[in-house]
Every structure is written in structure tokens, then in C-alpha cells.
Image (spheres, rainbow, N blue to C red):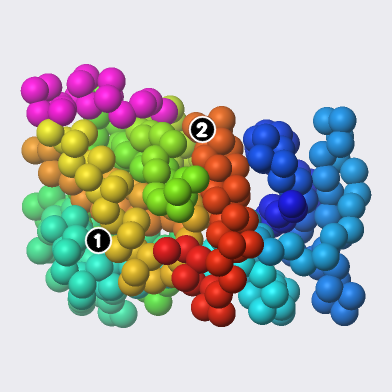
């Protein structure tokens, strides 16, 4: 049995090597490839297979299942070609932050997790939103790795602009210049600032890292707390910071309330992924980012359709291999016309 592991980088990363070995336990050969290595005329993938711990070239026919990142969808023709011939692990991104918020708000079940948000086109509306909440975040609707995120604060008649590890006091004129010339309102989303900070004053969020398991159900390889050490705004480790596992962090920062918060986070991990799939697209990987304010209230920061594998690497590889075994058996034993039925 063969599956294709398709990613938007030419050379296989260390995780692909680990995953290949985990899949081999089930007798599954993992073929690594890039979207441009699909020969659509001959219906062949020019991939690589791990042999004696080295990647060697191997051509294969289109396999029954392809594990791909949502980032591969920028190759539109190739993805359309594969959709017609294989089962895919991802059918694209869940949408922008704004779109995810809207569909969850319209549905209502998880509305209590949503942060007050607004898109604005003019400074007057931006200023009104700032005046209402006093502290707001400006973030790209399709941003990655915590890049391009600003914190704007209003205190009396002065304003504070924070970015990465810098902050400066600005006037109303400078604030208007920032809005009109430094950010593009058409690509930015504005949200009330949630003070999700540790006792040391560092911003953090909780990443619920999810994978479909050997029963075709969502499971959590790791609950991770990402701490933006010396950062003013973001907690993403790519911007500098550290990580912690969930329980020790909650015990250190939320006293007697830690267990109730942990249980609430775990409930989100067991329920929200299914809602996201129902409202958006089928998937096999997901990252849910949760903020916690000083009172222990939880807020949804983001839902990621292509989460990383830097932490919990072994657990993620093992669960992915279990899922490969599950989905290949389901494909062979239950041929269906509607591919989405294979996820249920």
C-alpha cells in the first residue's frame, strides 16, 4: 500500500522521515512529493521513498489517499486534478479569521468563545471601535506566525502603539497616519484586545494540536502553551519565545482555578473540531489557539488548517500512521461515490 505525503517544500523534512517509519509499521509506503512533481498527462507522481534511511526517487500512479497541506492549494490545476482521482486529507483552508468567526457566530454554539471583532474602511469607524474597547488588536486576516500584528491602546488623550517587543506613545495625528498609511484596512481585522498574559507579563496562547486517529476521530497529540517572551503583542514562537505543556503552566498561573480551565480547554478540543468541519471543510489536521484572560475566561484566537509539527512530533507521526491505516482500509472496504463519506 502506498500513500503520498505532499508538502510545499522540495526536500523532505525530518518529520517526513519519522512519519515514513511509523507508516511502515502498517506496511504502508510513504511517498514524499511536491505539487509540481505531478505529471498530469501520464497520471504519475515523481516522488521520493525512504530506503535504508535515504530518500530515493520513485514514480507512482496516483495513490488512493494523499496527505497534503492546505498550502498546496496555491497549485490550483494540480489540486483540481488530484481531487478527481484521490481522497485528500485537506480540501483547502478553513477561511480567513473573519470568515471562521462569522460562521461560528452565525451557528451560535461556540459564540461565547468569540472576541468582539470588526472590519473597518475609514478612520472614524476604527477610532470608534478603539474608543469602545480602549485596547484593540490589528491583525492580517490571512496572517501567519504572528506577523504584522499591532496592539493599539487608548489612555486618556494619549495612544500607545505596540509591535513585537517595541512600544511607543503617539498622538492622534500619528494614530490616523498609522491607520491610513501603515496598514491596509482591506486586509486587516480589528479585535478587542484579550489580556492573555502569564504572571510574568508575557503574552501566551494555548495551542490544541489535533489529528484524526485510527478510528477516524479527532484526537489531541499535545496541548501546548506558547509564550511570547519579551514580546508586547504575540505569543507565536516564530516571533521569539518559549513553550510549556498545559497543566504545569495553568497550575503556575491560575491557582485553584487551573483544573476548571484545563477541563474547559479539553472540552473545546473534543467538540470544536467537529463543528469546524461541519461548517467549513473536511480535514485531518487542525490547530486551535485559545487565549485565557485574568479571570480564567477562554477566547478563540484562531483555527489553523495547517498546524506545525515542531512539538509533539512523535505523537503526531504515530497518530497520522494510525489514520493512514484506517483510511486505506475504509477506501478498500467501502468504495463510495461521495468522497466526504470516507471521513465520517
Residue placed at 56% from the left, 30% from the top?
314
On residue 315, the disc is 2
Does residue 188 appear in this view?
A: no
Corner quadrant of residue 42: bottom right
Residue placed at 83% from the left, 55% from the top?
47
Between residue 231 and residue 275, name the one nearer to us: 275
Q: Where is residue 202 in the image (x, y as percent from the top left)?
A: 30, 31
Give, as a single range, the part of the protein colored magenta.
243-259
Corner quadrant of residue 168: top left
- Taking the view exactly as shown, the residue that stands out farthest to the front is 333
Chain-order first, disc 2 or disc 1 = 1
Q: Where is residue 36 in the image (x, y as percent from the top left)?
A: 80, 66
Q: How far apart are marks 2 and 1 (CA)?
A: 34 Å
Would you say the magenta stretch is mainly helix, strand or loop? helix
* Circle 2 Cα neighbour tier, 10 Å, few/some/many (<14 / 14–19 / ≥20): some
On residue 191, the disc is 1
Corner quadrant of residue 20: top right
Q: Where is residue 134 in the image (x, y as percent from the top left)?
A: 14, 55
Name the quadrant of the C terminus: bottom left
Number of residue marks: 2
Amino acid at each position: 500500500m502506498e500513500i503520498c505525503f505532499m508538502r510545499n517544500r522540495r526536500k523532505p523534512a525530518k518529520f517526513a522521515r519519522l512519519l515514513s517509519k511509523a507508516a511502515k509499521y502498517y506496511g504502508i509506503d510513504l511517498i514524499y512529493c511536491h505539487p509540481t512533481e505531478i505529471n498530469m498527462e501520464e497520471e504519475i507522481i515523481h516522488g521520493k521513498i525512504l530506503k535504508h534511511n535515504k530518500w530515493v526517487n520513485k514514480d507512482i500512479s496516483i495513490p488512493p489517499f494523499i496527505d497534503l497541506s492546505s498550502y498546496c492549494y496555491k497549485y490550483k490545476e494540480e489540486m483540481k486534478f488530484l481531487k478527481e482521482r484521490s481522497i485528500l486529507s485537506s480540501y483547502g483552508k478553513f477561511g480567513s479569521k473573519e470568515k471562521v468567526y462569522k460562521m461560528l457566530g452565525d451557528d451560535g454554539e461556540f459564540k461565547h468563545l468569540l472576541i468582539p471583532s470588526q472590519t473597518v474602511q475609514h478612520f472614524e469607524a476604527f477610532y470608534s471601535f478603539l474608543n469602545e474597547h480602549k485596547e484593540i488588536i490589528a491583525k492580517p486576516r490571512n496572517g501567519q506566525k504572528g506577523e504584522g500584528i499591532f496592539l493599539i491602546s487608548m489612555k486618556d488623550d494619549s495612544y500607545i502603539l505596540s509591535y513585537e517587543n517595541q512600544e511607543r506613545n503617539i498622538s492622534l495625528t500619528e494614530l490616523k497616519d498609522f491607520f491610513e498609511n501603515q496598514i491596509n484596512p482591506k486586509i486587516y481585522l480589528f479585535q478587542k484586545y484579550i489580556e492573555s498574559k502569564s504572571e510574568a507579563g508575557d503574552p501566551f496562547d494555548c495551542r490544541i494540536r489535533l489529528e484524526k486517529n485510527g478510528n477516524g476521530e479527532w484526537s489531541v497529540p499535545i496541548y501546548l502553551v506558547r509564550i511570547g517572551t519579551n514580546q508586547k503583542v504575540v505569543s507565536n514562537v516564530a516571533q521569539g519565545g518559549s513553550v510549556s505543556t498545559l497543566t504545569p503552566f495553568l497550575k503556575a498561573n491560575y491557582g485553584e482555578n487551573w483544573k476548571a480551565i484545563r477541563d474547559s480547554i479539553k472540552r473545546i478540543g473534543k467538540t470544536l473540531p467537529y463543528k469546524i468541519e461541519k461548517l467549513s471543510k473536511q480535514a485531518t489536521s487542525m490547530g486551535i489557539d485559545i487565549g485565557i484572560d485574568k479571570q480564567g475566561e477562554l477566547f478563540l484566537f484562531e483555527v489553523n488548517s495547517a498546524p506545525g509539527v515542531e512539538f509533539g512530533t512523535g505523537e503526531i507521526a504515530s497518530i497520522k500512521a494510525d489514520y493512514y491505516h484506517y483510511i486505506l482500509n475504509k477506501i478498500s472496504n467501502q468504495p463510495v461515490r461521495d468522497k466526504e463519506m470516507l471521513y465520517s
